[in-house]
Image (cartoon, grey):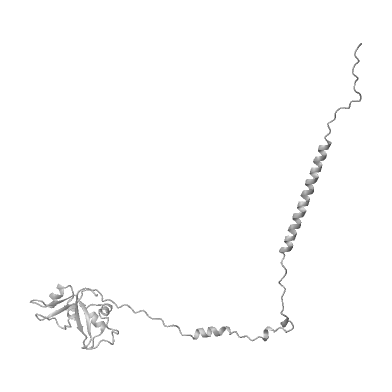
Amino acid sequence: MEEEEAPKKRNIRPKETSRLPLITLLALLAIIVALFVIGWEYITDDAQGSEEVTNTLPDTTSKYIPPDFRDEPEYAESDQEDTSLPDNVGAAVAVQEPPAPVAEKPKPAAKPANVGGQEITHTVASGETFFGIASRYNLSTETLKSLNPQLTNTSTDLKSGVTKLNVRVQAVHTVGPGDVLRVVAKKYNVSKKQLMDANGKSRDYAERGERLVIPFGVRK
């Protein structure tokens, strides 16, 4: 007898893999995250608003009038006493002040002119002038003045027979045999007239043993 075949199962539903629970779970998680973010922003906005309120300072610029002076009238500027000085008072005082004396620096003493030659002493004679004495020895007035710094006024300090001036000449020559004025002048390269003027001679003559002053050939 043939074995009876096993009865076949009826109405067998195919297995279905549904993803609905997973999608639902993800949607819930998204909603929770969104609610959390919104709540956090709301909390932070409230905190910032409270800080702004606490940092706002009260307005203290309004003028406070003490109670004792509220009812007193204000004084006009014209009623106040003007104690300032006029502008020209200070200038007048400054002009009236005498200037402070300035100490003058002492002038350095003039150094004698270095013209060379030999120094002699000339005693001022009657009628002689400072310019005439300088010309007699062929010196400039500046050179003669520098040789005599003791003179303060060359026109009034010259006294006949008293004032003695320092003079520079080329040399002092002692007359020897055959020394006539022409020969002596030629020896020192000066003219005979210059030699006679320097020694106060009015005639061409020189004695033996006489000391002749030899002026410079060129003005010093």
Quarter of the figure that contains the C terminus: bottom left
The residue at the far front in this view is 1
- Indicate whether 167 appears above or below 6: below
* Residue occupying the point 76% across, 57% down: 46
The residue at the far left in this view is 177
- Indicate whether 80 appears above or below 169: below
* Residue occupying the point 52% across, 85% down: 93
The residue at the far top in this view is 1
* Residue occupying the point 77% across, 49% down: 37
Tally of numbered discs: 0
* Residue occupying the point 14% across, 72% down: 187
Quarter of the figure that contains the N terminus: top right
Q: Position of residue 92 (x, y in %)?
A: 53, 85
Q: Position of residue 105 (x, y in %)?
A: 36, 79
Q: Is residue 157 left or right of residue 186?
A: right
Residue 217, quarter of picture:
bottom left
Q: Position of residue 26 (x, y in %)?
A: 80, 40
> Is residue 143 or residue 93 the one in the foreground?
93
> Is residue 73 or residue 10 the one in the foreground?
10
Q: Is residue 68 left or right of residue 12?
A: left
Q: Is residue 172 left or right of residue 88?
A: left
Residue 61, quarter of picture:
bottom right
Q: Position of residue 5 (x, y in %)?
A: 90, 16
Residue 202, quarter of picture:
bottom left
